[in-house]
C-alpha cells in the first residue's frame, strides 16, 4: 500500500501508474483519500510487486516525478481490498444490535489502520475497554476529545499514530496505526460520520 501525494491535475495519476508499472508494480486498486485546497491530492494505491521487484524502487520511481511524493508505504494483508465506507454502512445496517462493536472491527479495514478500541470512561478518569480488535493494546488512555474527532498523542507511545472519535459523553473510539501515516482531516471527518451513523443505527436497533 502506497500513500501518494500528487498534483491534483489531469494526467498526474496516469504518470504515477506508469512509473509504478515500469518499476515492477501491478496496481490492484486506487482510492482518492483527499483533495486539498493547495492543488494537491492524496491517493492510496494498493499494488502487488513482481518477483524480484523492490518496494524501494517503486518509491523512488514515484518520487522522481515532478510534484509527487510517497508519504507512506506498508505491507497490506494478502487478498485485502479497499473497504469502502458504503460497505461498512451496509454491514452496520444489517446488524443493528451489534453496530458499535462491528464498527470497531471494521474501522481498521476501512482506514488501513492496525487496531481500534471502544472505551468507556471509569470513575477514576481511566478508560475501560468495551470492545477491541485483536491487535489492540491491552490498555488505552482516556483522551479529552471535546466532542469532535481528533488526532491524539499518548505519552510515551512512540510507535502508534492515534486518532479518536467521541461516542457520547462517556465512551470513545480510538484507532491506531503503527508507524503512520498521520490521519488526514478528511479521514477524521469520514470516521466521525461513520461513528455517528453507527450510534444512530444502534439506538434504532
Image: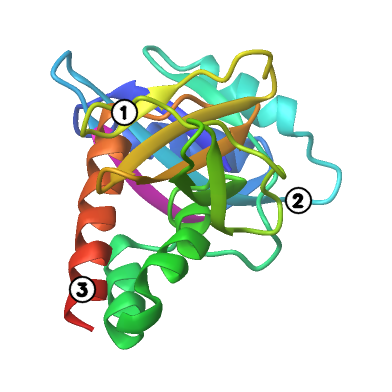
Residue 197 position in % (x across, y down): 20, 62
Closer to viewer: mark 1 or mark 2: 1
What's the distance in space between the residues labelled 3 and 2, CA to CA?
48 Å
Q: Residue at x 32, y 87 (%)?
A: 94
Residue 139 position in % (x across, y down): 67, 40
Q: Is residue 160 visible?
A: yes
Closer to viewer: mark 3 or mark 2: 3
- SS state under label 1: loop
Residue 185, placed above or below residue 111: above
Residue 202: quarter of image:
bottom left
**Is 16 left, or right, of 73 in this rendering?**
left
Residue 2: quarter of image:
top right
Front-most of residues 33 and 121: 121
Dot 2 corresponds to which residue?
A: 50
Q: How is the image coloured?
A: rainbow
Dot 3 corresponds to which residue?
A: 203
**Is 81 left, or right, of 169 in this rendering?**
right
Front-most of residues 149 and 80: 149
Range of magenta residues: 28-34
Packing grade of label 2 (10 A; few <14, some 14-19, many >=20) is: few
Quadrant placement of the C terminus: bottom left
Whichever of callouts 1 and 2 sits on the residue coming sooner in the sequence is 2
Q: Residue at x 53, y 17 (%)?
A: 63
- SS state under label 2: loop
Quadrant placement of the N terminus: top right
Packing grade of label 1 (10 A; few <14, some 14-19, many >=20) is: some
Is residue 188 shown in magenta?
no
Residue 165, placed above or below residue 58: below
Q: Residue at x 18, y 67 (%)?
A: 200
What's the distance in space between the residues labelled 1 and 3, CA to CA?
22 Å
Tell me the chief SS of the magenta region: strand
Dot 1 corresponds to which residue?
A: 145
Amino acid at each position: 500500500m502506497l500513500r501518494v501525494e500528487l498534483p491534483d491535475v489531469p494526467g498526474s495519476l496516469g504518470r504515477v501508474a506508469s512509473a509504478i508499472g515500469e518499476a515492477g508494480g501491478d496496481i490492484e486498486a486506487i482510492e482518492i483519500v483527499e483533495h486539498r485546497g493547495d492543488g494537491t491530492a492524496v491517493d492510496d494505491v494498493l499494488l502487488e510487486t513482481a518477483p524480484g521487484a523492490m518496494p524501494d524502487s517503486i518509491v523512488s520511481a514515484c518520487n522522481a516525478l515532478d510534484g509527487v511524493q510517497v508519504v507512506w508505504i506498508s505491507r497490506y494483508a494478502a487478498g485485502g481490498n479497499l473497504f469502502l465506507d458504503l460497505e461498512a454502512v451496509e454491514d452496520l445496517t444489517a446488524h443493528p444490535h451489534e453496530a458499535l462493536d462491528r464498527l470497531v472491527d471494521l474501522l481498521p479495514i476501512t482506514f488501513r489502520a492496525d487496531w481500534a478500541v471502544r472505551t468507556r470512561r471509569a470513575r477514576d478518569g481511566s478508560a475501560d475497554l468495551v470492545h477491541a480488535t485483536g491487535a489492540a493494546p491491552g490498555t488505552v488512555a482516556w483522551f479529552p476529545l471535546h466532542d469532535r474527532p481528533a488526532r491524539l498523542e499518548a505519552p510515551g507511545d512512540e510507535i502508534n499514530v492515534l486518532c479518536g472519535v467521541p461516542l457520547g459523553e462517556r465512551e470513545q473510539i480510538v484507532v491506531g496505526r503503527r508507524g503512520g501515516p498521520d490521519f488526514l482531516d478528511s479521514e477524521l471527518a469520514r470516521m466521525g460520520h461513520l461513528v455517528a451513523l453507527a450510534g444512530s443505527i444502534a439506538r434504532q436497533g
